[in-house]
Amino acid sequence: MTARPPALRGLPLLEDLGELDGRRVLVRADFNVPIIDGPKGCRIADDMRITATLPTLKWLQERGATVVCCSHLGRPTDGFDEHLSLMPVAKRLAALAPGIEVMENLRFDPREVEGDPTFVAELIEGFDAYVNDAFGASHRSHASMIGPPKFLPSAAGRLVAREVEVLGGMLTEPTRPFVAIVGGAKVADKLGVLDALSTKADVIIVGGGMAFTFLAAQGRAVGGSMLDESKLDACRKLLKGPATILLPTDVVALEPGAGFGQGERGGEVRRFDGDLDDGWVGLDVGPQSAASFAEAIATAGTVLWNGPMGVFEDERFAEGTRVVGEAVASCQGKSIVGGGDSARAVDELGLCDEIDFISTGGGASLEFLEYGDLPALAALRGASNAPHAL
């Protein structure tokens, strides 16, 4: 038997389920897709999360299994909500993989989020095996994520296994130099990830609103830009290494009191070298910074990108994200996009086909990068059929 990559050791895969002909398999999928409510009813705006699990579903069907999918959709607060029904997903899946049943939205029952054992028992009744193909929800300790492996032979689906193999391999055996690009608005949301990456990456590029707390930690004036003073000491600690941290040297900013984002286009826009004037709000890295970041990315052996460089929804502040995105797509090494807004930016820039791997997880990707594991993955490794040999 071929040895598994280190990241997949101990994790049961589809091949570990044994004979499946005539058996019923419950697949926890991530069908949390965007639904548009129009005059002709609800329709799916983007079916990527449905098509992403087709390799797993078809593999099971080809081996004679009866497959039933379960998933959440949105955050219902009071039982059934027709706008959050999975019926549109069931119709779409019926066209893509006929014969597969889809349960109604798991979160219509509050016991799902509570991780209630009685809900687990009801969920798995009549099933012979369980498959988790919902990486994007694997950071949740919900009933459908951590309960079934305690009672049924279980496995990671193809999508989950690929996520673990790529992200886990990047953390343990990256081709160097390893360059991590971390952006987004709030530094508090990314400090754990930055701390973990600081011991694994060679270079960390910091952009987005979170960069201004780092700049302030260096003693620079950041005007009216986003600043979390409670995290200044944490930023100073990270700036001391061991990874080299690259920060913006110039910034594109908006005059005080002006609006930005979708639908807001007022106010003067100015580039600042060094300190920002009082009240000016930095909303993108400047061209000098973007070029410097792109140069560091170009020769990387491994590149991880998580978070935009600015408010890219507003074209006035999208250039930094575009330059970095194109650099990631054309770098000589392996390019990995860690889901969330980065994945959306790559899609809008038309670069998806040029990226080696785009994670389907948002919060799950961040938590995996920070801790190297997720509650649902730990549950799978505890299943009765989990492999113990390397």
Image (tube, grey):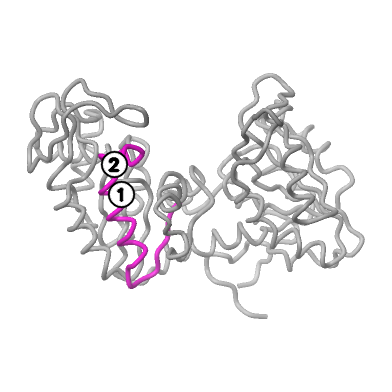
Where residue 160 appears, as percent x and y from the top left, is 61, 57
The single residue placed furthest to the right in the displayed view is 22
- From the viewer's side, name the closer residue of 354 and 336: 354
User: How many marks on residues?
Assistant: 2
The span picked out in magenta is 310-338
**Callout 2: SS:** loop
Quadrant position of the N terminus in the picture: bottom right
- From the viewer's side, name the closer residue of 69 and 324: 324
Quadrant position of the C terminus in the picture: bottom right
To which residue does mark 1 refer?
Answer: 321
**Callout 1: SS:** helix
Which of the 4 image quadrants contains residue 64?
Answer: bottom right
Q: Are marks 2 and 1 in contact (CB under 8 Å)?
A: yes
Q: Specify whether residue 334 is painted magenta.
A: yes
Left or right: 132, with 136 as reference point:
right
- Residue visible at 71% across and 31% down in the picture: 40
Q: Please, is residue 145 above or below residue 13 in the view? A: above
To which residue does mark 2 refer?
Answer: 310
Query: Which amino acid type is shown beneath numbered disc 2?
Result: Gly
Q: CA distance from mark 2 to mark 1?
A: 6 Å
Which is more N-terminal, label 1 or label 2? 2
Query: Which amino acid type is shown beneath numbered disc 1?
Result: Thr
- Residue visible at 79% across and 52% down in the picture: 152
Mark 2 is surrounded, within 10 Å at the Cα level, by few (under 14), some (14 to 19) or many (20 or more) other residues, namely many
